[in-house]
Amino acid sequence: MRQYRLWVRLPNGTTTHTIVTADNDLAAKQLGEAQFGKGMVLNYTRVSS
């Protein structure tokens, strides 16, 4: 499992960073979209290997 920093858009229009733990890049993005809504993950970066 790796940690990813996601840059997400919140419903009020602001953005924030959050950390998720996932097996791969796609899973990290899918976790973010499940939490914040489809299309709300603007970027993601692996922060640990």
Image (tube, rainbow, N blue to C red):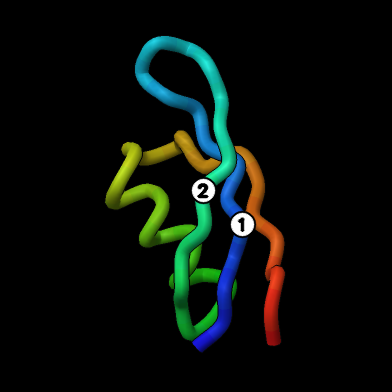
In the image, is residue 25 above or below residue 39?
Answer: below
Q: In percent of the image, x 46 and y 73: which residue is there?
A: 21
Q: Which mark is residue 5?
A: 1
Residue 32 x, y percent position in the rendering: 41, 52
Label 1 crowd (10 A; few <14 / some 14-19 / many >=20): some
Q: Is residue 49 left or right of residue 6?
A: right
Above or below, 17 relative to 24: above
- Residue that protrudes farthest toward the top in the picture: 12
Crowding at label 2, few (<14), some or many (≥20) Cα neighbours within 10 Å?
A: few
Q: Nearer the viewer, residue 14 or 38?
A: 14
Give the quarter of the image for residue 31.
bottom left
Q: CA distance from mark 2 to mark 1?
A: 6 Å
Residue 14 as seen in the image, left or right of residue 35: right
Dividing the picture into quadrants, the one containing residue 38 is: top left
Q: Residue at x 48, y 12 (%)?
A: 13
Residue 16 image offset from top left, x and y in percent: 56, 32
Q: Residue 36, image x and y in percent?
A: 34, 39
Disc 1 marks which amino acid? Arg
Q: Secondary structure at mark 2?
A: strand
- Residue at (45% x, 37% y) in the render: 39
Which secondary structure, mark 1? strand
- Tell me what residue is drawn at x 69 percent, y 87 percent: 49
Quadrant for residue 42, please give it.
top right
Q: Amino acid at mark 2?
A: Thr
Q: Earlier in the sequence, mark 2 or mark 1?
A: 1
Question: What label does residue 23 carry, if any?
Answer: none
Asked if the residue at tag 1 contacts the one at tag 2, i.e. Cβ–Cβ closer than 8 Å, the answer is yes
Tell me the residue that label 2 is attached to: 18
